[in-house]
Amino acid sequence: MASEIPEMMTAVGYDAPGGPEVLRTEALPVPAPGPGELLVKVAYAGVNRPDVIQREGKYPPPPGASPIPGLEISGEVVASGEGVENINIGQQVCALVTGGGYAEYCLAKADHCLPVPEGMSLAEAAAIPETLFTVWHNVFERGWACEGETLLVHGGTSGIGTMAIKLARLFGIKTIVTCGSDEKCAAAKSIGANHAINYKTADFVEEVKRITSGKGVEIVLDMVSGDYVPRNLKCLAEDGRHVTIAVLGGMMAELNMAVIMSRRLTLTGSTLRARPDDFKTLLADEIHQNVWDFAVSGQLQPEMDQIFPLAEAGAAHVRMEAGDHVGKIVLQV
């Protein structure tokens, strides 16, 4: 390992689960990269809803993952483990990681990294991996999204929602999103959503029927679950696909299976963090082949909300939980 790499680093941790106030900085040893791994000097780390759920004690890291929060980073490669061939020391990368992002140094699998395009800031690069990997897999791979179809997204101004809007537009897919205020609806439409529904003042099921002239949408990307699921199914066209990626509204849903059969609906969903490394490698390869040129050309850029210093991770979590953000929150390391 290079001599300029310190033995200790500053990272964000907590002594016991709780609210945002439990987050605090601590000194920890700098990790050493193993086979196929990179040590990245972190410039920025993305803040995501799973970080909040982990801090609350409801989403423990998978076996072998760092207990430090943070699922995506950007920065400079400063050391590499055995078997890494295609990424050089000094190269700037962004990466999907299973934990450890809220720190000055973080380990990343070389196969889960993407090169930071020229012209893209490191702050923007840190805001891409988690939402891009999630949306690509769930909307395009599991949801079989095709040009000319319509996608319904709940939480249209979230990090996932804004990425879904941008990706859908690049691939010729219309988007209908739900938001919690008229201001957020306007923001979603300015980002590229074709339609935005204020779910607090309108019934999104009826609005989707109106917008689609009764046909419904081909895909629903659902982060709510619970009692939203039967309502979502009413929004689907025949042969529609319902993809769940979070259960913020509850884990249980009551369904009419006869309706699902008669209308040939598909219900699926996934989580990403605990998936095997080989799966994430294949996903990164597919994104590099099919999507990354849009990032290189500047056509795909994350929607940025606010940047907080690493030591103010708690304040970043407060903003996320308040729901006032539009796009991605990141930490500057």
Image: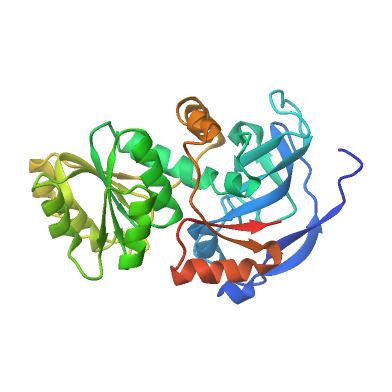
Query: Horizontal and vertical percent for residue 114?
Result: 60, 34
Please identify the quarter of the rendering in which residue 146 is found: top left
Does residue 34 appear to the left or right of 259 in the view shown? Answer: right
From the viewer's perspective, tell me whether residue 316 is left or right of residue 299. right
Which is more toward the observer, 214 or 298? 298
Residue ID at (13%, 39%): 264
Image position, residue 44 (x, y; %): 66, 52
Q: Percent x, y for residue 36? A: 69, 31
Q: Residue at x 37, y 52 (%)?
A: 190
Can you tell which quarter of the image residue 232 is in?
A: bottom left
In screen coordinates, is 236 left or right of 274? left
| Quadrant assignment for the N terminus | top right
Between 79 and 170, the residue placed more toward the observer is 170
Q: Is residue 170 above or below residue 198?
A: above
Residue 82 visible from this viewpoint? yes
> Looking at the rendering, which quadrant does residue 144 occupy?
top left
- Residue at the spot x=70%, y=37% of the render? 92
Query: Looking at this rendering, what residue extends furthest in the right direction?
Result: 3
State whether residue 68 appears in this view. Answer: no
Is residue 217 or residue 256 the one in the foreground?
A: 217
The quadrant in which the C terminus is found is bottom right
Please report the residue visible at 87 percent of the width from the left and 50 percent of the height from the top: 6
Q: Position of residue 180 (x, y in %)?
A: 32, 67
Snapshot colouring: rainbow
Number of numbered discs present?
0
Vertical relation: 193 (above or below) 54: above
